[in-house]
Image (cartoon, rainbow, N blue to C red):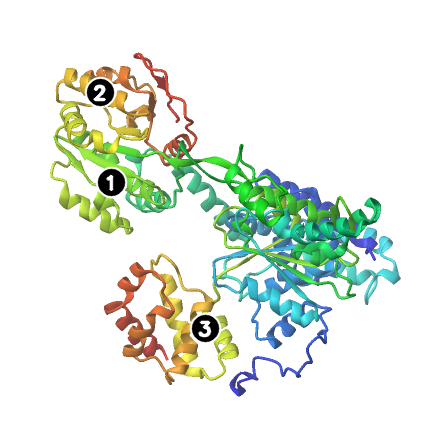
Amino acid sequence: MIDRSLDHAYTHLLLDFGRLLRDAGLRVTTGQILDLCRALNSIDITNREEFYQAARCLLLTRHQDEQLFRALFVAFWQRQQTRAETALDRDTHSDLLAQSSPSSQPSDGGQGTVQSQRLLLSVPEESGDDSANKEEDGDAGRDQLAAYSATEVLRRKDFSELQSREIAEVNHLIAELRFQSATRKLRRTRRAPKGPHPDPRRALRETLSHGGELMTLPRREQRRKARPLVLICDISGSMERYTSLLLRFLHAIRQGRGSVETFVFGTRLTRITRQLRLRDTDQALREVSTEVIDWGGGTRIGESLATFNRRWGRRVLGHGALVAIISDGWDHGDPAILAAELSHLQRLSHRLIWLNPLLGLSGYAPLTRGMRAALPFVDDFMTCHTLQSLQDLAHFLAELDDHRPERGHQHTMLASI
Amino acid sequence: MPEDVTSTFPVVEARGAGTPAPLASIDQLQQALLGQYYVADRSLAVALHLCRQLGKPLLLEGEAGTGKTEVAKVLASLMGARLIRLQCYEGLDVSTAVYEWNYARQMLEIRLMEAQGRSREESLKDIFSQEFLIKRPLLQAIEHHDPVPPVLLIDELDRADAEFEAFLLEVLSDFQISIPELGTIRAVTPPVVLLTSNRTREVHDALKRRCIYHWIDYPSLEKERQILLLKVPDVGQVLARQVSAFVHRLRELDLYKQPGVSESLDWARALVLLGQSELQEATVQETLGCVLKYEEDLHKIQGATAHSLVAEVRAGV
């Protein structure tokens, strides 16, 4: 039985609320709003918490949106309450009395509707069993919205401009990044119900139990394997402002992936794969700092790459590896050596990516000798100066396909700011 | 029921199996869940109530070990309904979830009929009959003939793949299955559907919006204490308080896998079996494996940290 008074009074309010949620980025369909309208009959609408809980379970679909949802809920119904208290007595009061019929009201007739609408529009408190602190209702909405947008701003802030208290937050966000590997096709196949190739061996075996009749056609598909990833990071003086955050990124990118080899260089090359294998970030970074001795000093990119090519190249670059070099290109070594070694490295890898944090600066052009010497041998030139750019890098790495990039001294330049 | 807790919980009358409890209001539902030793938040009770009233499926998301599967079992027993469970895994498809023809038996039947020399029309009708149909959980839930609707639990939906989710979306909209040889089977009373997810991946948006959504978090200190007292009969007030305080402190630390409610319950039962009435450091060091299941976590907590936590918890009492 549909409560007719509810139809007019609340439906448009709930639709407005739905519009507000959509504007804030939460995807709420009209169907869900209508479900909430239907649900009003089943709950006690004079109970603020119950209304909030019903709205939450019907309109929210992700746990991480709850903070934003609560903020918007509080803000919306607070606004309604202030509006209601002024306008209620004049206009809606008489309307509601006219609309409500004695049969549809549970107890007091018209008075009950007005009363319940007032209570419905008042702000819900946080219930004890659900979550933590009591807050000032008026400020709660604004505070939570502010916190939500502050994180978004932080994602786009250049690492070199972070304040000390923001660094901790960014560290936390870096640790939460999730990475997926780009894959390559193997020759080996495995069972797959919807694969492209039929599986004759299995088909034959299955006919045994069915008296020689083939019931279903088993299929196979080609297996895919993660591409090895090699990261070579510059930790010399000029990169100092980015180093600690980039190291955390290097640690985070390791988690959950197959083979990731990590190296750092300043004046010499050091392999830190083993140290970064530790799950605890702080411990891993401590181990790295004891292993590496040329922190914040000069840069010799060419010589370091020469060491890599001779000592590690054959070992880690097999099977179509992705190589990412993170450096600002300020080099004290010989550009000719840099060019030669980088060209060798490019030939051995599936894709060579150069990440330059300075690309985030407006007006930056790669004019230094080192960068100019290196660019012809780079497949992708990208930036790594904000958290957003690291996320974009992660997407880029995950979506690489099997095509070899076109070489012959051309490169694609991608600056995501 | 332990006598200590009668002040907080109602007296529960013994109920025969299959006698449904009165579940008309949210309060009654919450009390009835309590009567089955399941401590539910008000918001969970609201979500369950709306699930039954609106006929929409309920998606329960949360960390492992927070009682998502348990609530389905308890709800079924409260409603006096049958619990039909579909455990999801990658590669789950129509033949394992809905129905499959029993090919082997059909082949034998055909051979027999050939030997008997029966006509083709008769044979076909017999081959594709209910006798040779293997009914899997989804079909069982739809073809349910009891007036009380069954509770369909689709467990760990995040382990199934996107194709299965699309199929599930279709089934949950109409509650009908078409079997080409038999026709369309419609549900007389649509089942009460509960889906659970451990959030190892995001469930597809379309399916989420079809459902009522509820996130189950780790319980609060007080709630965990209540759960322990309810479900572990001989635990005693002191041990319950200490165990829940200890596990609560563990969850604040940086661990790879935070202990869930099932871990607290296991630990409490283990301690009771060992004859403990309060936390002693030696026993705690020995039984930490009930609570922490990762080598790195055990290594981190055993020894000094466990020592200080036990001292802290005992002082707090």
Quadrant where the image shows the C terminus of chain B:
bottom left
Could you say where residue A325 lies in the image, as x and y percent from the top left? 26, 28
Could you say where residue A118 lies in the image, as x and y percent from the top left? 70, 57
Q: Which residue is tagged 3?
A: B265
The answer to whether residue A39 shows anywhere in this view is no
How crowded pointer 2 is (Cα within 10 Å; few <14, some 14-19, many 20+) is rated as some
How crowded pointer 3 is (Cα within 10 Å; few <14, some 14-19, many 20+) is rated as many
Sequence-first disc among 1 and 2:
1
Asked if labels 1 and 3 touch by Cβ distance under 8 angstroms, the answer is no
What amino acid type is highlighted by mark number 3?
A: Leu
Q: Which residue is tagged 2?
A: A344
Could you say where residue B128 lies in the image, as x and y percent from the top left? 76, 50
Residue plotted at (44% across, 64% down): B260
Left or right of A148 on screen, residue A206: right
Q: Which residue is tagged 1?
A: A244
Q: Which chain is disc 3 placed on?
A: B
What amino acid type is highlighted by mark number 2?
A: His
Above-or-below relation of A202 to A372: below
Could you say where residue B208 lies in the image, as x and y percent from the top left? 61, 47
Mark 2, mark 3: which one is toward the viewer?
Answer: 2
What amino acid type is highlighted by mark number 1?
A: Ser
